[in-house]
Amino acid sequence: MDFKLKCDGWIKLIEDTLADFMEKAARTSQPCCRAGSEKSIYEAMRYSLMAGGKRLRPMLALATCEMLEGDINDVLPYACAVEMIHTYSLIHDDLPSMDNDSYRRGRLTNHKVYGEATAILAGDALLNYAFEIMLDHAMGSDSNMGAKVKAMGIVAKASGASGMIGGQVVDLESEGKNIPLELLQYMHSLKTGALIKAPVMASGIICGAGGEKLELLRLYAERLGLAFQIKDDILDVEGDFSLLGKQTGSDEAKGKSTFVKLLGLEESKKRLASITDEAVHALDYFEGKGVFLQRLARQLLERKN
Amino acid sequence: MDFKLKCDGWIKLIEDTLADFMEKAARTSQPCCRAGSEKSIYEAMRYSLMAGGKRLRPMLALATCEMLEGDINDVLPYACAVEMIHTYSLIHDDLPSMDNDSYRRGRLTNHKVYGEATAILAGDALLNYAFEIMLDHAMGSDSNMGAKVKAMGIVAKASGASGMIGGQVVDLESEGKNIPLELLQYMHSLKTGALIKAPVMASGIICGAGGEKLELLRLYAERLGLAFQIKDDILDVEGDFSLLGKQTGSDEAKGKSTFVKLLGLEESKKRLASITDEAVHALDYFEGKGVFLQRLARQLLERKN
């Protein structure tokens, strides 16, 4: 397996599908008599959605599907929905009243280009559209309806107040405070972890995994999510603006608690390595079939952005 | 039928169910190690959701269900979901970068109490929770799954970029401009109309309506939505702060186009009456069973807030 080639292929599939969904959204919107003014919302949605990025979350959904020998076409809508939800959360997170960031992935943030009002609505619309495309897919055929509804429920729960949004609230309220490691880990398990776990679990459900298989997928995804966040904190200290596409040292400047701050750089790196190992070994059960997901976990440990 | 008594009974059922959903959300959220800080998001959600109001949208869902002799318990989750989506849209609409309103239903707006960041997240969380409760309901039993998914799809489409959010964008971009009546009507059909039509249609689908029945429900709901908006514009000119719970004259002050501005007060009132008539007569087909919905349409014409 050429890992890089496989990644690139999946990223292309994901980006093409996202572009198709956006094209379809703009096309099926009722023509606005004279103004054509709501076009701008689709531009703003597309600006952030098509801004590149690792496409980690949708890739996890597709790779899980491949490991389970499922049908990629049944998983793609969930993969794209999760990426839309991730993107909306970044748009809202970057707003002046939230993290007040001007750059994201080397480009101006959404509100810097389209203004705050449109950025808020573009975020809302992406969250909403995520559910539209999953529901459209479910309406497309009556087969496997129970699993589809369950997968949508997993995504919905992961992105809500008991998942990602809950994590954002804890994050907001922890700023400038010294918080214990336990709370930091809990915060990240919601803020970042929930939406890394959701595509793996939703894909697993759609592809018919249950029992032990589903538990191992959960373990893999939870460990991966935690490793991802520790690496993020390390990059904020050690990273390179030109590779990261955003300023380093921003956690420090904002008084945010991080793994590096609480554990030190060396201990953070040690934990990152051991947690990545746990993720990798969770998939030993699947023998050769989990090799891409295992390699992906190792790759995230080495990433520069 | 004592109309007032029936309304009050339904409002109580709706508010009790909304309160239950919020209580459940706060309870099932994972306990936050030490901080308990994400409690605030549920407080902010509840503050706006439980702030009273006419509960028009959920009431439409329930009354449609009764007319069709469906099971109220199957419609309640959709009724509440639509009210949550309506509430989130008000929270985001009131933000400084949007309409910048300080009062809503006689109380401070969400961001005035909880701050902008929490208000944005509370809105996001309400939109998300709307889908969570509909999906939870669908997962509860496999029966009528196709209709449930279809009803969710109707709600999702109505609240998205080709529905309510699209209307908000047209509204934002029309501020301070003179727009033609056709565009004003189009804007309202999305901004207000879509989420008045959705509970009627979703309830209709859940209760097994099809063909002609569904078309008549659509006609009723579309006429009602338009009448509702014309009345809103009239109230902004003629209304009373103490009854409205918000400042009058705000459309004028913000340079918004309104039916009153484009048609004059008298012509607006004439249209309101004839459009209300159309809504009422759309339900003649259902004979005595549509009497509550017909009375509701007439009542909205007379309302003071």
Image (tube, coloured by chain):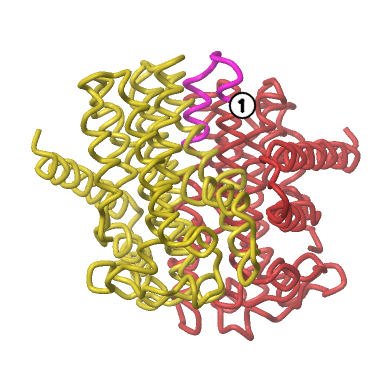
Chain colours: A yellow, B red
* Residue at (23% x, 73% y) in the render: A242
Q: Is residue A62 above or below residue A29?
A: above
* In the displayed structure image, the side of residue B201 where residue B270 appears, left or right: right
Q: Nearer the viewer, residue A89 or B50?
A: A89
> Is residue B64 shown to the viewer in this render?
yes
Q: Nearer the viewer, residue B1 or A119?
A: A119
Residue at the spot of label 1: B137
Residue B289: image quadrant is top right
Q: Is residue B34 above or below residue A279?
A: below
Q: Nearer the viewer, residue A111 or B161?
A: A111
* Residue at (14% x, 46% y) in the render: A8
> Is residue B162 shown to the viewer in this render?
no
Residue B68 location, x and y as percent? 66, 23
Residue A168 location, x and y as percent? 56, 57
* In the displayed structure image, the side of residue B36 where residue A38 appears, left or right: left
Q: Is residue B199 above or below residue A147?
A: below
* Residue at (28% x, 20% y) in the render: A68
Q: Secondary structure at mark 1?
A: helix
Q: Residues within 10 Å of mark 1 (few under 14, many from 20)?
A: some
| Picture quarter with the C terminus of chain A | bottom left
Residue B245: image quadrant is bottom right
Q: Magenta stretch?
A: B138-153
Count of residue discs: 1
* In the displayed structure image, the side of residue A4 where residue B204 appears, left or right: right
Residue B284 location, x and y as percent? 65, 33
Residue A72 location, x and y as percent? 24, 28
| Picture quarter with the N terminus of chain A | top left
Majority secondary structure of the magenta segment? helix
Q: Is A185 in the magenta?
A: no
Q: Chain of mark 1?
A: B
Q: Is B150 in the magenta?
A: yes
Q: Amino acid at mark 1?
A: His
